[in-house]
Image (cartoon, grey):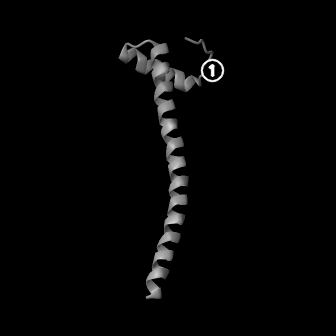
Amino acid sequence: MKTVSLKIDDSIFGETEKILSQMKKPRNRYINEAIDYYNKFQKRVIIEKKLRVESELVEAESLLVIREFEALGDVD
């Protein structure tokens, strides 16, 4: 396990302490779970962005293929 020193805004720290007192959970465990959750969220955001870009590339190629097929149909 790694040791990390953090500077946390006073308001965030106070709110966290209030929540922790109700949860009966160690601060370290709470922060680890919060970072883990945020990492998973950010991975999803990254994947969504990649999918959006790839989808746009496929869309453009699909439209080109459709136009080519339509042009073949017009030849008859």
In what quadrant of the picture does the N terminus appear? top right
Q: Is residue 71 above or below residue 59?
A: below
Which residue is the extreme one toward the front?
76
Callout count: 1
Q: Which residue is mark 1?
A: 7
Three-letter code for the amino acid on which mark 1 is drawn: Lys
Foreground of the two, 44 or 5: 44
Residue 17 location, x and y as percent? 47, 18
For image coordinates 53% across by 64% down, the residue present is 61
Residue 4 location, x and y as percent? 61, 15
Mark 1 residue element = loop
Foreground of the two, 45 or 76: 76
Q: Residues within 10 Å of mark 1 (few under 14, many from 20)?
A: few
Foreground of the two, 11 or 63: 63
For image coordinates 45% across by 22% down, the residue present is 33
Residue 2 location, x and y as percent? 58, 12
Q: Quarter of the image holding residue 76? A: bottom left
